[in-house]
Image (spheres, rainbow, N blue to C red):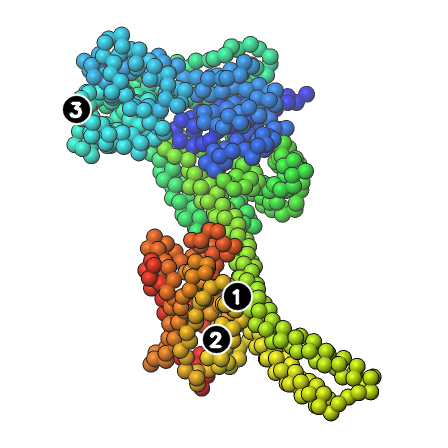
Amino acid sequence: MNKKRCNIGVVSIYIENYYFGSLLKGIQNIIKQEEGRLFIFNTYMLDKFRMDIKGDEDYYTFSFDHIDSWIILIGVKAEYVNRIIKSGKPVVFVGQRSYCGNCTAVLDDSYNGAKQAVEHLLSHGHKRIAYVGANNIYDMSQRHAAYKKTLEEHGFYDESIVYEVSNPVPNIGKNVALDMLKNGIDFTAIFAANDYLAIGLIEGLKDANIHVPEDIAIIGYDNSDSGKNNVPALSSINQNTFEIGREAVRTVMRLLKGENVGKEVLVISDLVIRESCGCIYKTTDDIITVDVINQKNYMIERLEDVLYKNSDLGTRFFALSISEIIKLIPQITDQYSWFCFGQYTGDKESKYKIITQTVVDNISKSKIDKSIECTLESFPPLELMPYQNLGKNDVVLVVPISTEKKNIGIMSYITKIHEETTLFVYEMHMLMFNLLGIAIDRNLVMTDLKETLDSLKKTQEQLIESEKMVSLGCLVSGVANEINNPIGIGIAVTSELKSNIHKLKDLFEENRIPKTALLNLLEKNNESSEILLSNLQKASNLITKFKQIALDNSIDETRIFKVNDYINDVILSLDLNSRNMDIKVNLKCPEDLYLICNPGDFYRMLTSLILNSIIHGYDEGRGGEISIIFEKTDKSLVMEYKDDGRGIEKEIYDRIFEPFFTFKKDNDGLGLGLYIINNIIKQKLGGTIECESEYNKGTRFIIKLPLSLIAQ
């Protein structure tokens, strides 16, 4: 009977560099012995881009149906960890203490390892020993505790030479070296909480002509390949991450069998003495072999291939749509035998259903672009994967593709853990994941921006129409008031005519119509008819003018019009006398000036200028003068508009042409008057507008229109 192969899921932000690469190699070593399958969940994009979980922990359930037990490496989001724990399957933490009663943590014995490092520096006679580490990482907090306790026992601990960092990488270590130089170096040795920080410190001190170990002794932690090959070779604590990975699998297998393994399993660390602490010593494991040289050459070749591909693919990302970017996702990774990408359906009711879009099988040389739906928990679909034929060295990578704006989907592929992964300081595919996330978010932002701009454009058009309606309202008000007089006279005359006709009728019925009375009534009726006709003609003329102005205001049509007459009609339509203001408008315009343009634009410009003066320039009941002067020059037709109102305050002068800006909050305007005037003059009439104003001394607008608007 065939033994059931156990599927172990390892969750990690990174899968390459000395620490994570060594852990994964150790994990795989025991899984191969147990004939299990290794699923690695690379959560880099979740950590980099997702600041929240959209209020739905079910998002983290991808591939849950395939996993029998879990190993969680440091740095994984708490929400994800909680969801894994809720699944009820055995969980082992690596590099961090378990905060769940049913889980076990496999840890480096960081306390005793750090104690060895500090005691070795003390044995060299160092009393002032600085510390650099990231105490937000559990292992490093233990190293700091041992450093502090050991120095306190000797009476040498000094908080002022403890440097805490957020991220333990070389460039941060180099920056700390600069801080040390600024503060003044009053110590003779440094204990760095990992090798990367130590290497950065050595580099930063070297730039300042401070040499290790001649001037300052340094010990790191991890015993990384980078530390071994550093100049000087770095003394370090061998964390034995490979063995920690092996022990994590042994522990999780025991949990699967129902054994009680306790809360913590510690893996002993050893001091590895090299040159940076001041010792003259070379261990046999530091001897450079042909295999080491070949491994490094292979690493360089792979690095060159990845950089070349990344530069080309990254450039293409920013020129494509989201759907086109998704088609390129299989090219993000390399050296896979099988690849699958699934995209979220986006249907809230389907609870994160996945539509498998692309399957590439490099062994059978086949590609499937058939859409297959599955649940988030069952991705990747096992029926599409060469699941039963996975080799002992094969691992299944599962990578959620998630950006700051959106959960896109998941890619999964079968590959191998390469030997050179432990030589890299940073994750090889970090750059491509970053470019992918940024490119997708850029696309989403550009789409949102376009929709927003379209919406704003529609809103602007609606508001401009609203301003047109305000102008039309003024026109209607003016029409009503101007026509009121002739119509009122007409009504009175008609009433008198009616009375005269009744008198004539009464006299006729009484059969007593004196000639003088008849002539008198006929003469009165004739006068009344002439008055009535005159006022009706006046009303008709006013209606014709107002109708033309209203038509100009509602349609976009170019025609020739006489400027002098048109402006007078506009002023008449505004009915300034009825506004309880004694505002006089003086017009100086050549009689032979005709323009060819849309008179509606001219009307809106002029009414907005006059209404702006009335609303903002004068208090109710106050008199004033507005002057409009036209002058033709060699280069343009100049229109000077000037009022003697209150003017514009200096503080707001620069903002008068901004949309929705008004300095009179108690009126019903939208703050679009001068903004619309500016747009009409520049965009519709092709001219320019300048404003000159001083508070309490009036406002002057100089409008220059192109000579091409003048009708010959």
Q: Where in the figure is residue 343, as x and y percent of width and height?
A: 60, 42
Q: Which residue is mark 2?
A: 567
Q: CA distance from mark 2 to mark 3?
A: 92 Å
Q: Amino acid at mark 1?
A: Ser
Please name which of the two marks, 1 or 3, marks the residue nearer to the observer: 1
Query: Residue, x 52% and y 42% (percent of image)?
Result: 405
| Mark 2: few/some/many CA within 10 Å (<14, 14-19, 20+) | some
Q: Nearer the viewer, residue 490 or 264?
A: 490
Q: Secondary structure at mark 3?
A: loop
Looking at this view, name the residue that lies furthest to the bottom: 515
Considering the image in quadrants, where does the C terminus appear?
bottom left
Question: Would residue 674 appear left or right of 170 to someone viewing this image?
Answer: right
Please name which of the two marks, 2 or 1, marks the residue nearer to the observer: 1
Q: CA distance from mark 2 to mark 1?
A: 18 Å
Q: Amino acid at mark 2?
A: Ile
Query: Residue, x 33% and y 27% (percent of image)?
Result: 165
Q: Earlier in the sequence, mark 2 or mark 1?
A: 2
Q: Secondary structure at mark 2?
A: helix
Q: Which residue is mark 1?
A: 578
Q: Which residue is mark 3?
A: 214
